[in-house]
Amino acid sequence: MIETKKTKKRGQGDIVLLRYMGLRPMTLILLMLFFLYFLSFLTVADAADFQRLLDARTATCWVEGEALDELVLNARGRLTFVCVDRKMGEFLRSARDEKDPWKKGGPPQWLRFFGQNYARRKGQTLFVANIGASKPWTFDTGLLTVAGRAAEEGDILRGVIADPQKEIPPGQSELPSGYEGVLAFFAPTSLLKAGTEIEIGYGSDVVKWKIPGRNE
């Protein structure tokens, strides 16, 4: 006669363990739901913190455009400058990868990619410029200005993109209509006094930008 052994039903051992720990299955479910809610709260907080940092460090300049109320007409292109100071840089380095669901409200890939180089040069602050060309544009990096100082050849961040053909080199480049790209450059931190207002832009097209304070 073949002897058979009784086997526990699937999950029975887990239930016994929970009872040993003083937990009921329903209690565990409630704890798991609370944990998921807590994670979702952190996601919203991360996105809100990033947006607050970004708003205080962003300035948009339209090149050769005509302002009509809140519209800009006939612009050759757009430059959206993002100042990546230490506070923003540390946030970008700690940002989660693209697979995380909070990415919809978090840093875009281009800003994370370039912004992580914020501490590369001592005494220099990194600016990341998102560039959009509405018309063919002879783009000149020497016309980028921060607080009245024009960017020099050595200020342009290079060697970050694996394909050199996708980089905008120092000097002039011909950008076609519809071009979208990113350029990063450094400016002396001594020009950036917290709480003061400076001009940033391209050539004679500049906008006023207030440098964020320590608590911003």
Image (cartoon, rainbow, N blue to C red):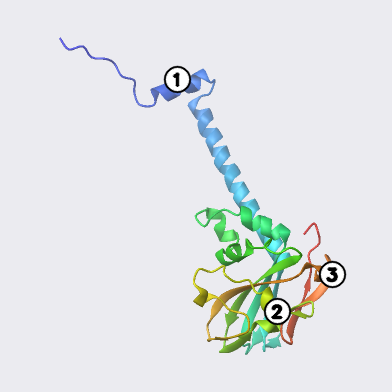
Image position of 25 (left or right of 46): left
Residue at 50% in and 29% down? 26
Residue 196: mark in rendering: 3
Residue extending furthest left? 1
Circle nearer the viewer, 2 or 3: 2
Does 10 appear above or below 94?
A: above
Circle nearer the viewer, 3 or 1: 3
Q: Earlier in the sequence, mark 2 or mark 3?
A: 2
Q: CA distance from mark 3 to mark 1?
A: 65 Å
How dense is the environment of label 2, judged by Cα within 10 Å: few (below 14), some, or many (20 and up)? some
Q: CA distance from mark 2 to mark 1?
A: 70 Å
Q: Secondary structure at mark 1?
A: helix
What amino acid does circle 2 point to?
Answer: Glu
Residue 207: mark in rendering: none
Circle nearer the viewer, 2 or 1: 2
Residue at 60% in and 71% down? 158
Within the image, what quadrant is residue 55 found in? Answer: bottom right
Q: CA distance from mark 2 to mark 3?
A: 23 Å
The image position of residue 180, as x and y in percent, is: 55, 77
What amino acid does circle 3 point to?
Answer: Thr
Residue extending furthest top? 1
The image position of residue 150, as x and y in percent, is: 74, 81
Within the image, what quadrant is residue 118 found in? Answer: bottom right
Image position of 67 (left or right of 178): right
Residue 16: mark in rendering: 1
Q: Earlier in the sequence, mark 3 or mark 1?
A: 1
Mark 2 sits on what residue? Answer: 152
The image position of residue 145, as x and y in percent, is: 73, 79
Q: Nearer the viewer, residue 158 or 178?
A: 158
